[in-house]
């Protein structure tokens, strides 16, 4: 932070302001999505003559599901379009969870849509279901393409499901997701060619296309153009590497006017290192220190192919940085803060710890950091953390050793309460592997911390 | 898992409710659908309006024309041929005044047994909707998009002709 003092005054505050744009409240986002669903149903209602008989009812149900699916895929893409208000207000982790849940739902209703339409047409036109399925594929415009699209979406869905996902490299999973764009494009035309709501109404076709075009534009802007513009403006490049612990390395990234990014402690960027074999994939890594106007730092544990390759990066390598993302940023709390980090989850917590204001009065408990690692040699930043603690009057507890060695869980409600005075009044921030995050959250809840004051991020997406 | 079941359950329930309301609305839609069977009622109501116009100050040409045709009784108007991917579609309307009392198909898609089968179901629905709506703003029939599109197109051209003559 010292270098900041030479900068024009504005950004030299002891901790970064929580400004940097509007945060969309999750409730509002859900309300907007729900309003869209209501609109889609209204579209069906308006364009549907009274239902007579089984065939009509089945087709009607199939049409509602089809419209919902056509709307749903747009919502799913929009959630992943890296829209800054969503990233700030909802957080990347929660957006990814919504996307995963929504994805499973949409795939189910696409399957139901195809089944019900086939069955409904078969009843209405007095055909066998199998015959009608053949007719639909061969004689109805663009239905074959849409069927291919449904297959692609189903494939992506299966790959993303827990069981398969864990066996795949992050890269494979990430790139398979690009097929969803292809699927959405393939499925688009059958909606207008066959959809009874669209055949008769140009206005509806225009409105529906506008919805797709708007989301496509957002994706293009925030996922492609913005990172390129950022590269042009900030000229990110690798400045150097520093090993922190066995298998853990810090990457220093230099750039120009980085303060303009308004990155906050706890946030992350998606990094794309333009080196051979790495340029085609981007990975989310948290900032592990407060960003300076000329330098940022990430700290990465070498696990996958990609994070392993990071250790061989050469200084000067250009970097595309998408971000900053993440709603996992510290709120100012007068009642004190407890930070709980597990393993390499220390990276965002380290940046947040450095941003903690020194206690202003007796009523404020000193910021407390609890750092859990299975072995003392896995502890990174020990010197930095101790320095920060000393200069801010904050407290660090290192909890090392496996549960078996300790004979007790160091992240139990009882031991947390013993370590942190006034725990139940504090804001809590937890970051670590999924299992550890869950344990810590449960312990905090047991210790009386209300859910709304527990903020967490697991690096799992 | 519980969330998934909840989401699917509420979707199914929601669709069931929507469909049952749509079925229910037949009862209310039935009344206007019955109207075309009594063209005399509308004809006579149009006549005094026309007479009032003729006697009164602001007799627009349009109103006068309306009165004339109403007095003339039935007339038929032929729509343009709408070319679809499954063949031409053309309708003929029978009107009393501006009221559509009958729709006749002069041409309908003829693209093999599938197309005929679709038309056999879709066209009665389209005609029924036309008589209810009394305009070309009717809903397409699901599963019969070409027929619906062609029908609506030809119907619109016939109505344009009817209001111009």
Image (cartoon, coloured by chain):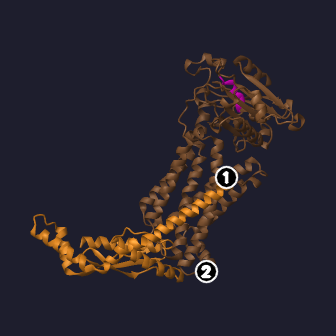
Q: Position of residue A186 (x, y in %)?
A: 59, 61
**Residue under circle 2?**
A128
* The magenta stretch spans residue A354: yes
Q: Colour of chain A?
A: brown
**Residue under circle 1?**
A177
For label 2, the SS is: loop
Label count reads 2
Give whichever of B37, B2 is nearer the camera.
B2
- In the picture, measured across the screen, residue A47 lies left or right of residue A373, that is left
Residue A249 visible, this orientation: no
Give whichever of A150, A241 is nearer the camera.
A150
Give whichever of A298, A38 is nearer the camera.
A38
Give whichever of A74, A329 is nearer the camera.
A329
Tag 1 and tag 2 share a subunit? yes
Q: Position of residue A139 (x, y in %)?
A: 56, 74
Q: Quadrant of residue A432?
A: top right
- In the picture, measured across the screen, residue B152 lies left or right of residue A53, that is left
Chain letter for the residue marked with disc 1 in the picture: A
Which residue range is magenta in the image?
Answer: A348-356
Q: Residue at x 13, y 72 (%)?
A: B51
Q: Colour of chain B?
A: orange
* The magenta stretch spans residue B83: no
Q: Quadrant of the N terminus of chain A?
A: top right
Q: Quadrant of residue A49?
A: bottom left
Chain letter for the residue marked with disc 2 in the picture: A
Foreground mark, 1 or 2?
2
Q: Residue at x 17, y 70 (%)?
A: B49
- In the picture, measured across the screen, residue A444 lies left or right of residue A377, that is left
Q: Quadrant of residue A362?
A: top right
């Amino acid at each position: 932070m010292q270098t900041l003092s030479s900068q024009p005054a504005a950004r030299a505050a002891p901790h970064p302001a929580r400004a940097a744009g509007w945060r969309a409240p999750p409730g509002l986002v859900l309300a907007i999505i729900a309003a869209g669903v209501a609109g889609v149903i209204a579209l069906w209602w308006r364009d549907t003559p009274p239902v007579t008989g089984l065939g009509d009812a089945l087709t009607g149900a199939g049409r509602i599901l089809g419209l919902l699916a056509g709307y749903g895929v747009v919502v799913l893409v929009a959630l992943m379009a890296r829209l800054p208000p969503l990233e700030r207000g909802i957080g990347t982790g929660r957006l990814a969870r919504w996307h995963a849940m929504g994805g499973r739902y949409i795939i189910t209703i696409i399957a139901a849509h195809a089944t019900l339409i086939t069955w409904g047409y078969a009843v209405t036109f007095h055909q066998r279901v199998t015959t009608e399925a053949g007719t639909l594929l061969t004689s109805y415009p663009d239905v074959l393409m849409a069927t291919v699209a449904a297959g692609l979406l189903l494939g992506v869905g299966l790959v993303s499901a827990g069981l398969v996902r864990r066996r795949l490299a992050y890269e494979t999973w990430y790139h398979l997701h690009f097929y969803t764009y292809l699927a959405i494009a393939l499925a688009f035309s059958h909606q207008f060619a066959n959809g009874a709501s669209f055949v008769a109404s140009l206005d509806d076709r225009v409105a529906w296309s506008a919805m797709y075009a708007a989301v496509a534009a957002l994706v293009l802007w925030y996922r492609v153009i913005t990172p390129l513009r950022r590269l042009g403006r900030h000229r990110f490049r690798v400045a150097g590497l520093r090993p922190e612990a066995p298998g853990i390395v810090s990457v220093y990234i230099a750039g120009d006017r980085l303060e303009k990014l308004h990155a906050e402690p706890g946030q992350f960027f998606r990094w794309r290192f333009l080196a051979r074999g790495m340029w085609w994939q981007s990975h989310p890594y948290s900032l592990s220190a407060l960003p300076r106007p000329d330098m940022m730092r990430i700290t990465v544990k070498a696990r996958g192919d990609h994070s392993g390759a990071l250790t061989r990066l050469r200084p000067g390598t250009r970097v595309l940085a998408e971000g900053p993302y993440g709603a996992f940023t510290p709120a100012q709390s007068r009642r004190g803060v407890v930070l709980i980090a597990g393993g390499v989850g220390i990276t965002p917590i380290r940046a947040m710890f450095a941003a903690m204001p020194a206690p202003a009065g007796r009523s404020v408990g000193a910021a407390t950091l609890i750092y859990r690692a299975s072995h003392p040699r896995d502890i990174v930043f020990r010197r930095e953390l101790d320095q920060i603690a000393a200069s801010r009057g904050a407290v660090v507890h290192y909890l090392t050793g496996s549960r078996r060695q300790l004979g007790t869980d160091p992240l139990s409600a009882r031991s947390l309460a013993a370590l942190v005075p006034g725990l139940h009044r504090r804001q809590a921030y937890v970051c670590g592997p999924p299992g550890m995050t869950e344990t810590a959250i449960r312990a905090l809840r047991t210790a009386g911390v209300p859910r709304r004051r527990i903020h967490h991020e697991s690096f799992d997406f | 898992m519980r969330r998934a079941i909840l989401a699917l359950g509420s979707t199914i329930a929601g669709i069931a409710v929507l469909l049952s309301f749509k079925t229910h609305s037949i009862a209310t839609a039935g009344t206007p659908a019955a109207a075309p069977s009594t063209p005399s009622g509308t004809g006579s109501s149009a006549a005094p309006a026309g007479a009032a116009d003729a006697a009164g100050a602001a007799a627009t040409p349009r109103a006068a024309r309306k009165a004339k045709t109403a007095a003339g009784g039935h007339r038929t108007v032929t729509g343009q041929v709408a070319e679809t991917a499954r063949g031409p579609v053309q309708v003929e309307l029978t009107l009393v005044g501006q009221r559509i009392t009958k729709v006749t198909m002069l041409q309908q898609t003829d693209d093999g047994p599938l197309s005929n089968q679709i038309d056999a179901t879709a066209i009665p629905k389209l005609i029924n909707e036309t008589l209810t709506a009394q305009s070309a703003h009717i809903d397409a029939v699901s599963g019969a998009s070409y027929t619906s599109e062609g029908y609506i197109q030809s119907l619109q051209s016939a109505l344009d002709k009817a209001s111009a003559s």
